[in-house]
Image (tube, rainbow, N blue to C red):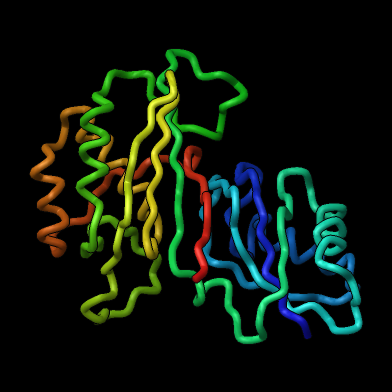
Amino acid sequence: MPRLLYTCAYDGQPYCGWQSQREGESIQDTIEAAFLRILKQPLRISASGRTDAGVHAHAQCFHADVPQECRMSVANWIAALNAHLPASIRITAAQAVSEGFHARFDATGKEYEYLICRAPVLSPFLHGRVWHLPHEFDACLLADALRVYEGEHDFRRFAANRGTEPAEPPADFYLRHIYSATLAEEGELLRIRVRGNGFMYRMVRLLVGTAHQVARGRLELEALRGMLQNPLGPKTRYCAPADGLYLRRVFYE
């Protein structure tokens, strides 16, 4: 069964997240339903990782083993799936990969983008796609706070509990390397990009939400640094909403 790696983009607003769930329509369920309509048999897909309800993606990646007898070109697979998917999900690319390739375990890094809009009145066309923050905060302080995250740190205070964590995690379980965390201002739109070798449950939203507290003057930069230097303290409670978060790219090397 040939293994194909697909790249897809989606608007996360209508869905309960990426992963298949008992209740609610997920993006995984929707794509697998499209395969079912094409193949007339079920097919499971494996993604590079999960995204939460309301989170969007420019380039989520997943692999699937398609039946040998289904002789379609890569281009035809893209067209066929898009014909059976809602407009809120689009397959943007596909390629053949080796039998042992895994979309999750072979990923070497990811880049996320977070959008903040400072306009006094939010455009209805941005509803559900940005974090609307019309109140005053210091964008320079926000950029300074983001830079604190760069480098290799124990980020356990910036990870929400999913309920699957080991009772006694290994020493490097919460260790992540953030290659860059930057802020770009485009008028009333602020664009945060965070790139790293891996991210834990809700980690990007917690990083952004806590950095925003620094930008509002409610948390000192030194206190933020202390959360990384002393990872055994209480977890941050400042979580940015899902609306502004986008999975921008998955890296494979």
Image quadrant containing the N terminus = bottom right
Residue 9 lies, in percent from the top left, at 65, 50
In the rendered image, is residue 200 in sight? no
* Vertical relation: 175 (above or below) 227: below
Q: Nearer the viewer, residue 140 or 26?
A: 140
Residue at left offset 32%, top offset 79%: 166
Q: Nearer the viewer, residue 65 or 218?
A: 65
Residue at left offset 54%, top offset 34%: 129
Residue 163 lies, in percent from the top left, at 38, 69
Residue at left offset 22%, top offset 28%: 216
Q: Please, which residue is most extreme toward the front here?
A: 253
Q: Please, which residue is most extreme toward the top here?
A: 120
Asked which quadrant contains residue 19, the reply is bottom right
* Vertical relation: 228 (above or below) 241: below
Residue 173 lies, in percent from the top left, at 29, 74
Q: Nearer the viewer, residue 243 or 145?
A: 145
Tally the marks.
Answer: 0
Asked which quadrant contains residue 110, the reply is bottom left
Residue at left offset 51%, top offset 46%: 246
* 31 relative position to 218: left or right: right
Residue 227 lies, in percent from the top left, at 15, 53
* 134 relative position to 238: left or right: right
